[in-house]
Image (spheres, grey):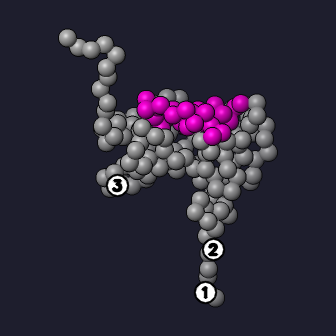
Amino acid sequence: MGSEGSRVVVPRNFRLLEELERGEKGIGDGTVSYGMDDPDDIYMRSWTGTIIGPHNTVHEGRIYQLKLFCDKDYPDNPPTVRFQTRINMTCVNQETGVVEPSLFPMLAHWQREYAMEDILVNLKKEMSAPRNRKLYQPPEGNDDQRMEQKGLILRCSIL
């Protein structure tokens, strides 16, 4: 009596709880990890990811920090992904650190089955791609000198 091809759609919060559990267990080879920014965020929107640069590339030995923002329409739509650590890759906006969906196929052709871990693993693979593996990299550091997504932040100090 069951219809073939039908599937159960897992609600957003259950899906994110599954991803959190996976991230906390450290599944995989240990070169990518992720978890929530704020454990008190009941909407589970803001996440932090880490990628250890792949061997035999200019990224080797570097640790990249990323922010992933899962809006209310996740997982139907992809999260916003932004490198906090400065990086030179063909799919990353150099001023904001945002992974440009139009330049990163996984985000451009997002499917509900994809997860944050998949994004991090695919970004690591992208680092090893011929177009990125030997690109000049900026000095290691975070985004303090980078322009924010919504505009330039001016830092003032009182002397």
Q: What amino acid does circle 3 point to?
A: Asp
Which residue in the rendered view is the most extreme toward the bottom?
Answer: 159
For residue 154, the mark is 2
Q: Amino acid at mark 2?
A: Leu
Q: Which mark is residue 158?
A: 1
Tell whether 69 sits left or right of 92: left
Element on which disc 3 rests? loop
User: Is residue 6 placed above or below 101 in the rendered structure?
Assistant: above
Q: Quadrant of residue 11?
A: top left
Label 2 packing within 10 angstroms: few (<14), some (14-19), many (20+): few
Q: Is residue 152 above or below residue 45?
A: below
Query: What amino acid is found at the position of numbered circle 1 in the picture?
Result: Ile
Q: Nearer the viewer, residue 101 or 92?
A: 101
* Neighbour tally class for label 3: few under 14, some 14-19, many 20 plus, Cα within 10 Å: few
Residues shaded magenta:
102-129
Vertical position of residue 140 compared to residue 74: above or below: below
> In the structure shown, which secondary structural element does the residue marked by tag 2 occupy?
loop
- Taking the magenta stretch, the answer to whether it contains residue 103 is yes
- Residue 26 lies left or right of residue 91; in this view the side is left
Q: Is residue 119 left or right of residue 53?
A: left
Tag nearer the camera, 1 or 3: 3
Label drawn at residue 41: 3
Tell me what residue is drawn at x 55 percent, y 46 percent.
81
The location of residue 30, given as percent across then percent down, is 52, 33
Mark-to-mark CA distance, 1 and 3:
34 Å
